[in-house]
Amino acid sequence: MTIPFHTPMLQDRDAVCQAANAAAAMENDAAFASIYLLRRKYRIEIAFQNGMLLRRYGAGVRENCYGFPLGGETESGIRLYAEDAKQRGIPLRLGLLTEEMCQTLSTLYPEQFLYTEAAEYAEYLYLRENIALLKGSRYHRKRNHIAQFRRGCPDAEIQPLVAENVDFAVNIARKWLENRENPAELSVQTEFGCIQEAAANWNALGLSGLLLYAEGKPIGMTIVSEISEGVTDVHFEKVIPNYPHAWPVVANEMAKCLPESKYLNREEDLGEGGMRASKISYHPDLIRKKYFAQWCGKELPTC
């Protein structure tokens, strides 16, 4: 029987969060906000089976892929995926798995999956305390940027980002978009659209964040949410033009505001050199490589 997948809805948040917590998930695609906001871009569908979260992707790099089952018995989830794939007439293929997930599959199904790395989708995770404190010589440049910003903007202050002031974050993102080399580019238009939708569903998505003010106006913002207990996903981080030293201020202040989190997931670099350099400059504590897994055995596992 085909799995009863459906397009993610706001009322799915509790069930998704429960599954992510049960799996101690650290991946950004396990964050409910990511699942919901990217549901159109990747044609994401989800289903629940005995508390286990099942995901299917219909577009993008994971087109016709399934997500690793979260919050339940992995073998049961794979059997359900296999039956669903058979019904749809597609290969059994799982997308953007961590090394630990691949090892689980290899243990359950030795030499039955073919694994290929997706290098540009590796995720960068940081100990929150390191970003909050910026101690040691390796963070010398970050501290210098923050000092330069403070000298130039002595009146700067931080305010919590909440539903009542989230329009300021949208305006910052709009200025960021307008300053792009090609504002009409689909990827940046999609990101801006996600920020607008995040603002419109702030509390329902469980989002939080901060605004950075300087010279009497909001100039920077970040939007985050919890993936699972102790792991926070940094979904969006923007600074308006002409404040280049403000970027590490936003990252540093957000980390200070999340004492309950152990790790910050600052997501992937998508193969972009500038984005990769930026993520490396914060000295990640974990770089979680990602892989595709495609069934290459003779017979699919059955329910």
Image (cartoon, grey):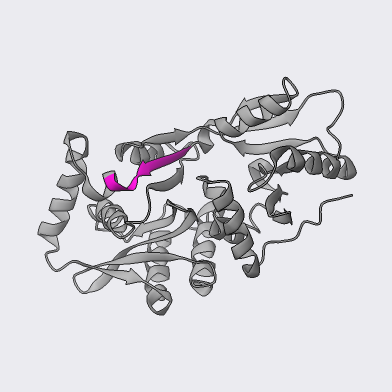
Q: Residue at x 64, y 41 (%)?
A: 61
Residue nearest the viewer, comparing 232 with 283:
232
Read off the magenta span. Answer: 123-129
Tell me residue 33's x, y (percent).
54, 60
Tally the numbered discs: 0
Residue drawn at the location 46% of the way across and 40% of the way down: 269
In the rendered view, tell whether residue 183 sits above or below residue 140: below
Q: Quadrant of residue 272?
A: top left
Establish if 218 lies above or below 292. Answer: below
x and y, in percent, of residue 292 in the image: 65, 32
Q: Which residue sits furthest top?
A: 111
Is most of the magenta stretch helix, strand or loop?
A: strand
* Residue at left offset 21%, top offset 74%: 216
Of the pair 188 and 77, the residue shown nearer to us? 77
Residue 169 vs 233, above or below: the answer is below
x and y, in percent, of residue 129 in the image: 28, 47
Pick whichever, 253 or 174, lies toward us.
Answer: 253
Q: Residue at x 32, y 61 (%)?
A: 240
Above or below, 216 against 302 in this view is below
